[in-house]
Every structure is written in structure tokens, then in C-alpha cells.
Amino acid sequence: QVQLVESGGGLVQPGGSLRLSCAASGSISGINAMNWYRQAPGKSRELVAAHILASGLTTIPDSVKGRFTLSRENAKSTVHLQMNDLRPEDTAVYYCNARMSRTKFDYWGRGTQVTVSS
């Protein structure tokens, strides 16, 4: 079992920044990747950052590249999503995801709301 707790969401004006955090606990040694997704109302869930723990490889899709970055704190099993130059279209619930190495099972956090509005 893996537990994921997100924090850091909120209301921000266009052009502003937010930093989301995801703290993992439980069977963290079995995690292959920790990722961030978002889901806006009426839209499907979208990957915004992917991080492979063993290699340290991070992938950011073109939709947010240059504005979103992912960082990791090994000692705390925590990943952060730094979001800069936020736009109204970034408004969504942001979810932390952990994919297990052996089973490929996905664990999800409860999500944190990000609203970009003036």
C-alpha cells in the first residue's frame, strides 16, 4: 500500500506561480514512477509531469514544457511540481500518482484544486 498526500493548491492570478507537493508513504520502495496529472471539468485526465525514481528521468509534455518543472526530495519521498506563468487553462484538480514497479498498479492522491483567475 502507498499513501499519497498532495498540498499546495489554491487560487492564483494569471502569470503567477504555485508549488504543489506530494508526499508518499507506505511501501515506497516498490514505486517505479511518481507522476502528476490534472483534470479540468469536462475533460479527461492529463499527464503534466512524469518521474522515474530509479533513473531520475523526468518528462514534461509540450503542453506545459517551459512552465512546469518536477523536483524530488529523496529523503522525504516527496515530489514537487513547480508551476510558473500560470494560465486560466491550467485550472484543474491536480493529482499525484505512484505507479508500482512489479504490479504496475496505480495509486492516486485525493487531488488539490488549482484555480487560475483574475
Image (cartoon, rainbow, N blue to C red):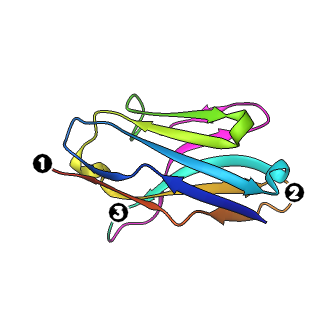
**x 35%, y 63%: residue:** 40
Query: Type of residue at label 1?
Result: Ser
- Spatial CA distance of label 1 from label 3 is 18 Å
Question: Is-magenta flag for residue 59?
Answer: yes
Q: Where is residue 50 in the image (x, y as percent from the top left)?
A: 60, 43
Q: In which quarter of the image is the N terminus?
A: bottom right
- Spatial CA distance of label 2 from label 1 is 45 Å
Query: Type of residue at label 3?
Result: Ala
Is residue 16 toward the left or the right of residue 43 in the image? left
Q: Nearer the viewer, mark 1 or mark 3?
A: 1
Q: Residue furthest top?
A: 66
Give the mark, 1 or 3, whose residue is nearer the N terminus: 3
Query: Badge 3 is on which residue?
Result: 40
Q: Is mark 1 on a helix, strand or loop?
A: loop
Give the mark, 2 or 1, whose residue is nearer the N terminus: 2
Query: Badge 1 is on which residue?
Result: 118
Q: Is mark 3 on a helix, strand or loop?
A: loop
Q: What element carries label 2?
A: loop
**Up-down: is 109 above or below 56?**
below
Q: Looking at this view, is 17 or 105 the one in front? A: 17
Give the mark, 3 or 2, whose residue is nearer the N terminus: 3
Q: Position of residue 35 (x, y in %)?
A: 60, 48
Q: Give the magenta part as a residue range.
A: 42-61
Is residue 77 toward the left or the right of residue 1 in the image? left
Q: Residue 102 carries which label?
A: 2
